[in-house]
Image (cartoon, grey):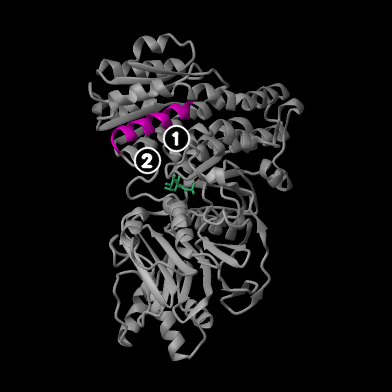
Amino acid sequence: MCGIVAYLGDRQAYPILIKGLHRLEYRGYDSSGIAIINGNLNLYKRKGKVSELEAFVEGKDVSGTIGIAHTRWATHGQPNDENAHPHFSQNKELSIIHNGIIENYNSLKEELMKRGHIFDSETDTEVLIHLIEDVQKNETLELSEAVRVALNQVVGAYAIVVISQNDNQRLIAAKKGSPLVIGIGENEFLIASDATPIIEYTRKVIYLEDEEMAILERGKEPEIKSISNIVRTPYIHELTMNLDSIEKGGYEHFMLKEIFEQPHSISESMRGRLRPGEGIISLGGITQYKNKIKNAKRIVMIACGTSWHAALVGEYLFEELTRIPVEVEYASEFRYRNPIITEDDVVIAISQSGETADTLAAIKLAKEKGALILGICNVVGSSIPRETHAGSYTHAGPEIGVASTKAFTSQVTLLTMMALMLAHEKGTISDSHHQQLITELSNIPTKIEAVLKTAPLVKEIAEKYKNSRNALYLGRGINFPVALEGALKLKEISYIHAEGYPAAEMKHGPIALIDEEMPVVVIAPKKGNYDKVVSNIQEVKARKGKIIAVVTEGDTEVRNMADHVIEIPDTEELLVPLIATIPLQLLSYYIAIMRGCNVDQPRNLAKSVTVE
Ligand code: G6P
């Protein structure tokens, strides 16, 4: 987590850096800071959001055409002014911003303290910039060389940018494990954790690889080399995202915009891939491995957070359609328990950001064991797609709200297409059922548009339950993960404790919690185990719980029992999660807003979790 941004060029750096920090604030918002060279190295930092930094620097000297800035998600040390980035070196001539964790910072710090270094903060980052200064002095090295030598002593993850008060001509950047993108404009360079602070100024970018560093000098071509000093020829990518996609576009919050974008984002996930007229699904990214995947003895899906919920939906889809056994693993658990993975396994890693540290580490582990690794990611050019053998982007567009919404439905869309394509190849689905599902999948965006029209009703329901202290979410079969996702959405943005359960499991414990205060959200489409879900609703009603039911249009049976119903259009059972998720997202959003919570930046969370 943490967002970094840097600028070197002809313009004033401050407005560009501040705007960049706002764009990256989703990555962490415990503190922020900025350092700009204007003769002196002027450094300002503040606990809290970027807006607090802006207020703090008012009236101060922020002029200069080279600078670095940082927004922090605390790892080492409290979120206070001292621990905020940028950090100074001992002589205060160098400054650094850093995203990642220096694991051996303690031993490095001890050594440096013995040599007289005094530290102002508790951070690992300050140790690194002191180390760079120490190396530079002791070995009388030029700065970029000192950075390179110092990085060879470091264990851990980093995306860093270093500047020196004595050199307003150069930015020095390096990366390992954490993301870093370099934008190349007309006589200017930008560096950032992702492309969103860059897109306004240039479409040309370089994605640094792990253990690479960049020396960016005014008026010169970027110089890229490995930290073992091997010169690399950079590949310049062309960004395709547009500016509108990273702005609120008239919505009050990114989360609401992203919820309402889902008809479009799902269509984008399917564009050029789902061809209902021809009865074809074509996923170019994995075609090469089609045979290997369809013959896999087992598929293991690894992910974290909301992406893990998408994987659980994927398990139902793949097992039902392809008859290949699927296991779903939390990446953080998988990587630390000597998992049994062989060359016959196919691993599917799912991640919105493509940067989640645990997912990345799990991929590397499974790769070492010989499995084929596929990725389903949203952020183009991020680390996971570059680490996997093949995969498909979700193409949902940038997701800025910390609570994932459109990325989830796009992940489920991708998993549905993958499962359908493989099932058809494998012959585990009839032509007619395949065609029926493809046609229905193509209708999902329109059906979601209809669900979004329930927003005013969902808002009324939210008003009634905004002061609840707990909530239960129930679903069966493929809608059980939808219940988990609904509960996660509520707890992460409204701070109401919520649990998702398979409906039938309620009687093995959670039922004890039910009283007249307890809202129970039930996903009860007229499909599959409908009758069983109806029985579960009766069990809740018998204990005076309040039922909010998501039902199929025209349902009367649940309507007669529930306190509130939200209707969704009828669809194929396997596609219900794509639709049923929407009202749950809206419910969390409205409840959180009514409780005065910051839905786009919920407390303690970050969108891109680049620490373990
Ligand atoms: C964080 C985010 C979640 C996300 C999870 C996994 O916790 O707040 O929204 O689901 O990370 O992230 P990924 O980028 O791998 O999907």
State which quadrant residue 101 falls in.
bottom left
In the picture, which quadrant includes the C terminus? bottom left
Label placed on residue 256: 1
Residue 599's spot in the image, x, y percent?
Answer: 37, 40
Amino acid at dot 2: Val
The relative height of residue 54 versus residue 350 in the rendered view (above or below) is below
Q: Nearer the viewer, residue 109 or 45?
A: 45
Amino acid at dot 1: Leu
Q: Which residues are magenta?
A: 580-596
Please, what secondary structure does the residue beneath circle 1 have? helix
Q: Which residue is mark 2?
A: 599
**Residue at left 55%, top 68%?**
9
Density class for disc 2 (Cα within 10 Å; few <14, some 14-19, many ≥20) is many
Left or right of 576, for residue 51: left
Please, what secondary structure does the residue beneath circle 2 have? loop
State which quadrant residue 472 falls in.
top left
In the picture, which quadrant includes the N terminus? bottom left
The relative height of residue 541 versus residue 100 in the rendered view (above or below) is above
Residue 111's spot in the image, x, y percent?
Answer: 35, 83
Mark 2 touches mark 1? (CB < 8 Å): yes
Whether the residue carrying mark 2 lies under 8 Å from ligand 1 is answered with no
Density class for disc 1 (Cα within 10 Å; few <14, some 14-19, many ≥20) is some
